[in-house]
């Protein structure tokens, strides 16, 4: 008989929060600021190093 599979770190971490709404809230606190920062970095790098079309 095979040993039980361990949950990955993300599922273990999310299982600490009792409700689905709390899990969504916690993930959103991390995901949205990260994506906003990533978008800004890509936008400004593209803006500063693009070739002028005129």
Image (tube, grey):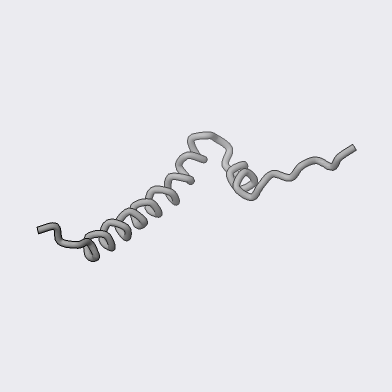
Could you say where residue 29 lies in the image, as x and y percent from the top left?
Answer: 42, 49
Residue that protrudes farthest toward the front in the picture: 54
Relative depth, front residue between 34 and 51: 51
Relative depth, front residue between 25 and 42: 42
Query: Is 17 situated above or below 54?
Result: above
Residue that protrudes farthest toward the bottom in the picture: 49
Say left or right for 48 vs 41.
left
Which quadrant would the C terminus be assigned to in this image? Answer: bottom left
Relative depth, front residue between 8 and 25: 8
Could you say where residue 5 lies in the image, as x and y percent from the top left?
Answer: 76, 42
Say left or right for 53 vs 47.
left
Q: Residue at x 38, y 48 (%)?
A: 32
Could you say where residue 13 lies in the image, as x and y percent from the top left?
Answer: 60, 48
Residue that protrudes farthest toward the top in the picture: 20
Which quadrant would the N terminus be assigned to in this image? Answer: top right
Could you say where residue 9 lies in the image, as x and y percent from the top left?
Answer: 64, 50
Q: Residue at x 26, y 61 (%)?
A: 44
């Amino acid at each position: 008989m095979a040993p039980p599979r361990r949950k990955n770190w993300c599922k273990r971490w999310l299982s600490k929060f009792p409700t689905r709404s709390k899990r969504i809230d916690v993930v959103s606190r991390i995901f949205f600021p990260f994506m906003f920062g990533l978008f800004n970095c890509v936008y400004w790098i593209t803006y500063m190093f693009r070739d002028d079309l005129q």
